[in-house]
Amino acid sequence: MIKTKVKVCLCAVILFLLCAKTVLAGYEGKSGYAYIYSWNVANMNPGPQTTLGTDAYKELTNPSILNDGQITREADFTPGVQPWCYAMNGSLDNGVFFGPWGGHVTFDLGNAKPLGEVIMHQAILTAHGVGAIEEIHVTIDGGAPIRFAGFDLSSGDGIVRQQTFDLTGHTGRVVKIAFATVTREWTSMNEVIFLPPGKTPLLYTPKSGYNLNDHIVSASVFHWYISGGGQVSGPWLPLEGRANWTGEVAWWKSQIKQMMTANIQVLFVELIPFMEQQRINLFQALGELRKAGYDVPKVVPFLDPVITWSIYGTPPDLSTTAGKDAFVNEYIRFFQQYYSVNTDAYADNYLATIGGKVVLDSYSLATLTNVGSLTRNDVESRLASAFSAAHPVFNQGIYMIKLVAGPDLVFTDEKIVQFENNSYYQPYTYNGVTSAMVKPGFWNQNVENPGAHLARNDGSDYTSAWNAAVANRNTVKHAYIESWNEYDEGSGIYAVDIVNSPYVIPPNSGTDSWSDVDDPYEYIRTTANGARSFNDISDYGFSVLYCDFPDYMYPGEHKTVRVIVRNEGDLMWSENDLFRFGQKEYLQGETLFGTGRYTIDNTANEVDIYGGVCRGRPVTFEFELTAPQTEGTYVTHWGMVQENVTWFGPELVHTFSVVCDRIPGDLNVDCVVDFADVAIMMEHWLEDSSTPAR
C-alpha cells in the first residue's frame, strides 16, 4: 500500500541543529560523543612544564586536551625548539597529553552509549623518547579488559598519527584505556574521539560444530614467531621473507587467508608458556576476520607437556589435586586468551567441537607422572567451573585427542600420529575413529646433526598422500596436516620463496625441490584440491551477509547499494572464471533493476595473491540500481552465477515498490516526510561535518 503524501516543514529542525552545533574556528576533527576524563596522576603527566599559568598546568585541574577538538598536525611542530615534541600548535605547550608505560585514562560518556570506532591522535618524536602506542587494554564499565595491538609502530620525528580500534558491539558509559606498553619511554595523545557505531555492518555469524562422522581437515599451527626471533633456521623461506613473520595481528591475517585458501577447517594451535602474545595475536586476527564476515577455521588447544614443563620445572603428578589443576590450567589459560580478544556472541562457535564437546589435544605425556589417574571429570569439571557460566559449550564435556605413542589418558577419544613418524601418509584407528596424518616433508638438518630429511620431491609424495586419504575416505574421517608452519623442521605448507629456498646451514649439505612448476603455493593448492575431494562441502555455495536494497524507489531513480556475500563452496571465485553476482533476468516476469551482472574486483579481493576468493571469504558488490520508469511492485530474484556454467546457492528475493513522484525531504523514499527522515538528515549532517560535536 502506498502511503499518503505528507509535507512537513523541516526549517525549524534544521535551524535548531545549526544553532546547537559548536563551531570552533581553526579546529578540526570528527563528530564523536561528548565526555569528561581523568587519569592516574601517579603515572601520567600532561607535559613536563606543569608550571602555574601554562595550559599543561590547567590540565591538572580542568582536563580538556583530549576532547577540545584541537588536533595537533605535523605542521604544528616547531623543529629544534625545546621542549621539542611539546612545542606544538604555534609553539605553545597545549594540545598534547603524555603518559608513560603503565598509565591509564578514564573516559566518562555521561550515560551508556553504543560504542563504535575510537580514534586516538598521537604525536611521535622518537629522538626524544616519545614513541607510538604499542598495546592498550580497554575496560568498559569495569568489565574484563579487551586487548588491542597491531598498531603502526614505525618511528620518526614530528609525526602525527591516528591509531584506531573498534568497540562496535559494546555499550557502556565509562571506558578506561590503559597503556600496556609503548615503544619508548613516553606515548603522546592529543585528541581521543569516540564515534557511534558506523554503517559498516558487523558480520559475525554462527557456525555449527562437527559430528563424529564428518570429514575434517586440520593442521598444526605454531605461534613462536617474531621478526628475528623464535624459529629462524628453517630450510623453506617464507614468500614474504622470514623477517616479515612478525607474529603481529596483520601478519596472522595473511597466514589465515593462506590456510583458508588451502580449505583447512581446524587449527591445532600450539599451547606452551612461551611467546604467548603471538598466540593471542592469532586469536585476535581470527576474531577481526570473523567481524568482517570471514568464516575462519576453528581452533583446538594443542598442549605440549614436554616443552611446557621443561619451562616450568617439575612436571605435575596427575594423581594429586595440585597436579590435576596444573594440567587443566594450561587449557584454561588458552581459552582465557581466546576469549580476551573474541568477545562476540559467536565466539564459542569457533572453538572446534565434535558431538557438541570441546576438542582438546595433547602431545606426549611421557614426562608427567601417574597419567592414568587423571579422569575425564577432572578436566571437564575444572573447565566448566572456569567458563560454563558465560560459555555454555563447556557444559557439554570434552573430546580428547592425543598422539599415538606414550602414556595414555583413560578418556582419550581419538589418536592422531603427531610429530612421531616420518612418513608422508600414516592412518591410525583408535576407538573406532580413523585419522590420517599427511605430511609434505621433513628437514631439520639446519638445527640438528645428523637430523632427518624426508624429501619434498617437488610435492609429488604429498599429492600421493592426499590421494590415499581421499581413496580411503569411507573409513578415514580426520585428515591431519603436519604441519602448517613448523619452520625449523621444514614441514610447513605456507607459501615459500622458491628463488632463495632451500636455505641450508652447514654442515647440512642436503638438497631438495619445492615445486616442479616453481609455484610458491604448491602445497596450499595441493591441500585445497585434496581437501575438496575429502571434506563434506559442496563445490558451489554462498550466503548473503548483508544487503541494503531499498524497499522504495522513485521511477527512473539511480541508487548505489551494497551486497556482501560469502563463498560457502570449495571452488575459488574470481572474475577470471566468470563468477558474478546477478539478477535472474531469465525468469518469467523479471524486470531488471540495472545491468544485471556485477563482477568481482580481483584487486580488492586479493585474487592475484591467493588465486581466487576461497571458501569462507566475503565479497562486497557495490553497484547502482536503476528503477524502471513505471510505478508498481516488482519482485526480483538475485544470486551468484558462474557464467555459462550454473547459478548456485540460495536465491535472494527482494520486492521493490516503485512509487509516486519525488517529495522534497523524503529521504528514505517511503512517500512520507516524517521524523524518520529527520533522523537520517541528522545522522548524515553530523557525519559530514568537520567540527566536533560537543
Image: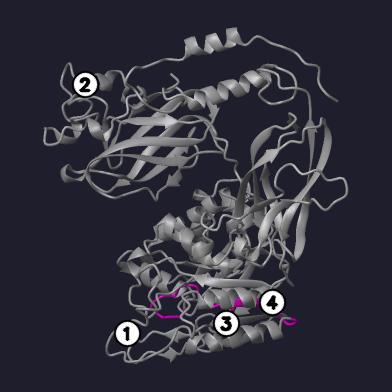
Q: Amino acid at mark 2?
A: Tyr
Q: Residues within 10 Å of mark 1 (few under 14, many from 20)?
A: some
Residue extent of the magenta highlight: 474-491
Q: Are marks 2 and 3 in contact (CB under 8 Å)?
A: no
- Distance in Å between CA atoms under marks 2 and 4: 69 Å
Q: Is residue 329 visible?
A: yes
> Is 118 positioned to the left or the right of 622 in the image?
left
Q: Position of residue 640 (x, y in %)?
A: 72, 56
> Is 277 positioned to the left or the right of 647 in the image?
left
The numbered mark, 3 or 4, whose residue comes first in the sequence reads 3
Q: Amino acid at mark 1?
A: Val
Q: Are marks 2 and 4 in contact (CB under 8 Å)?
A: no
| Quarter-of-image position of residue 401 | bottom right
Residue that carries the numbered disc 1 in the rendered image:
504
The residue lying toward the viewer, choosing from 404 and 648, is: 648
Residue that carries the numbered disc 4 in the rendered image:
533
Which mark is in front, 2 or 4?
A: 4
